[in-house]
Amino acid sequence: MISAGRDFLKSNWEILERYVSDQRKGIEMPPFEKPYQKDAFLIKLPDFKDIADFKKKSLFEAIENRKSHRKYDGKPLRLEELSFLLWTTQGIRNVTPKATFRTVPSAGARHPFETYLYVINVEGLEEAVYRYLPLEHSLILHRKDRYLREEIIHATLEQEFVGQSSVVFIWTAVPYRTEWRYGPASHKVILLDAGHVCQNLYLACEAIEAGTCAIAAYSQELMDRFLGVDGQDEMVVYLAPVGKISKG
């Protein structure tokens, strides 16, 4: 079994060595985030650094207490808390012409994800689907519909707790951002990168007395349709409802 695993890794590496990436061909790099209309209204996210809650718990405590939560107490998230969660999962610390350096690791700093939020109970935001713009640390309205809650519960195979959260983080992958550099080796590292993002969400939730539960059990077709993505150049890969949890 170990030998077979080594052969698999060696084979993948040999393929990558022979592959001439679009980057090496001089093809223009894909954008760091999906474009949007420049006259669109952006919701600027507030500063979160004065939130007292996440300063009360050490990193050791956050890791020690990390667990999946499927029951929430119904209290809304503050917009500052949502801002903090978004920064910890896809926030940008530095931008260069070829890369963004964020709060999570990514192969080649390619960061192939878009973050969508189905907001249910967040102070200052109406119930709707938003997209996070990491370069601007802002939100843009993506979709409004009176049946969003019913749709997402159905798309997540009737997992009712999804609709009882305050916000559902939905990550899509835009594969070409990574394929531009790594070609056939991209799809493995994209999925590894998704795990980095969601783990940061778990720890950040611990810091603000919130909870989350990563979900990979969903209908691909229905979740892609929920966001209006094509399932080819962009597709849902992971989601995680977030809500406040009782301290008792």
Image (tube, rainbow, N blue to C red):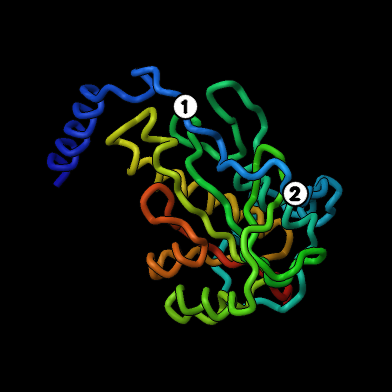
Residue 83: give x, y in percent of width and height. 74, 51
Name the secondary structure under disc 1.
Answer: loop
* Amino acid under disc 2: Leu
Specify the label residue 11 is tagged with: none
- Going by the numbered disc 1, the residue's amino acid type is Met
Q: Residue at x 63, y 73 (%)?
A: 145
Q: Relative to residue 174, is residue 121 depicted above or below?
A: below
Q: Mark 1 = which residue?
A: 29
Q: x, y (%) of residue 136?
A: 71, 40
For residue 18, above or below residue 165: above
Chain-order first, disc 2 or disc 1: 1
Name which residue lies at 33% across and 43% down. Answer: 188
Q: What residue would you read off at disc 2?
A: 42
**Of residues 236 and 103, which is closer to you in this image?**
236
**Image spot of residue 245 (x, y percent):** 69, 72
Frontmost residue, 37 versus 20: 37
The quadrant the C terminus occupies is bottom right
Across and down, in percent, residue 229 comes to: 46, 57
Quarter of the image where one finds residue 95: top right
